[in-house]
Image (spheres, helix red, strand yellow):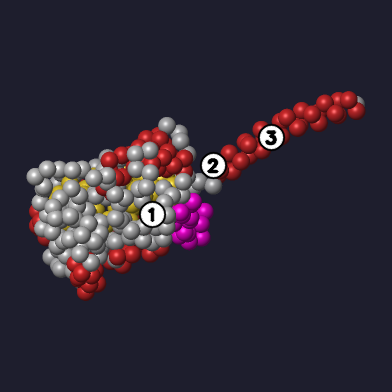
Amino acid sequence: MAAAGRGGGRRWMVVAPFLLVLLQLVGAASAAALPVVINTWAFRKAAETAWRVLQLGGSELDAVERGCSQCEIDQCDGSVGYGGSPDESGETTLDAMIMDGDTMEVGAVADLRHVKNAIGVARKVIEYTKHTLLVGESASLFAVRMGFPYEDLTTQKSLSMYSQWLNQSCQPNYWKNVVPDSSKSCGPYKRPEKVTCKEEQTTSRSVHNHDTIGMVVIGGSGTVASGTSTNGAVHKIPGRVGDSPIAGAGSYADSTAGGAAATGDGDIMMRFLPSYQAVEYMRMGTDPTVACQKVISRIQKHAPKFFGAVICANTNGSYGAACNKIPGFTQFHFMVSSPLLSQPTEHVVDCI
């Protein structure tokens, strides 16, 4: 009996670690629940608004639209909505998109002028057109036809930002390889007769200029919707469009896999379609956190100093996020709402 007992003990020592791993996996799985709302940065009111829409019976698209619209109203960090991020002519313009993961329809607007509710206009692109993306003044005219008021997006704050920038010889800006020297003057710039390409400098985007709200909503039945809204890069060249209104770059939703959204230096990040790539990783069974990390690592190989982060959620309700570690940006804050949380809760991840 004693020998049998000792053998049983040895078997238990072998089996126990496997049981522990199994229990951990079961625990991780049980930690996921639907519905879930996840959004970039600590934009709490946006998270609360989206969650409330779901609790009152609204659709996933309704939740995304209302949540992002809340940030447009609140001018989240000055980087969403009117009165922020003036371009180099002093005007604030808006970019936004919304995506239905059931139908794969996308509505987007870019370089939108004189209309405050950019995400609302993007929703109307889905509902009333066969198009995906409308841009510039024509997008504004469409918005007015859809009943949105034509308003001035300039505020005293944005005018002050613009004036200060002019007084600093228009530094920083987004020009390169032009004359006069864009690092010392305001221009106007033109192409030199002989181009001498300089090594590209690190982005002039401040890590404190968050620049986007990105949101993913997954309903109780697994339906996925996503969206973004931003006023873009501060002092951008007029006409510039970043990643936010581009499907697969700013955000992506697919009800057979999950959703993702990106924030950061859109001029770099949009080249890699990070939101689409993250969703495809999740489709293959990759954990949302790992999917986000893999996307960030992919961009790092080409632009190690880029500023950016990605949020991910799958149709089981699991979620995660990742960011690129650079000076001044070592952690990323994002919001999560789910039945397992008593209220929308701020989460933090260490950048990689």
Which amino acid type is marked by label 1? Answer: Asn
* Mark 2: secondary structure: helix
Task: Please say whether residue 346 is one of the residues in the magenta stretch.
Answer: yes
Percent position (x, y) of residue 323?
42, 48
Badge 3 is on which residue? Answer: 17
Question: Mark 2 and 3 residues: CB-CB less than 8 Å, in contact?
Answer: no
Using a 10 Å C-alpha cutoff, classify the residue at mark 2 as few (fewer than 14 neighbours), some (14 to 19) or many (20 or more).
few
Badge 1 is on which residue? Answer: 39
Q: Magenta region: which residues? A: 330-350
The answer to whether residue 110 is above or below residue 279 is below
Foreground: 198 or 56? 198
3D distance between C-alphas at marks 1 and 3? 36 Å
Q: Report the magenta stretch's main SS.
A: strand
* Mark 1: secondary structure: strand
Sequence order check, earlier mark of 1 and 3: 3
Residue in the image at 41% along x and 51% along y: 326
Residue in the image at 37% along x and 47% along y: 305
- Residue 120, by quadrant, is bottom left
Sequence order check, earlier mark of 2 and 1: 2
Foreground: 281 or 226? 281
Which amino acid type is marked by label 3? Answer: Pro
Badge 2 is on which residue? Answer: 29
Percent position (x, y) of residue 252?
31, 43
Residue in the image at 66% along x and 38% along y: 20
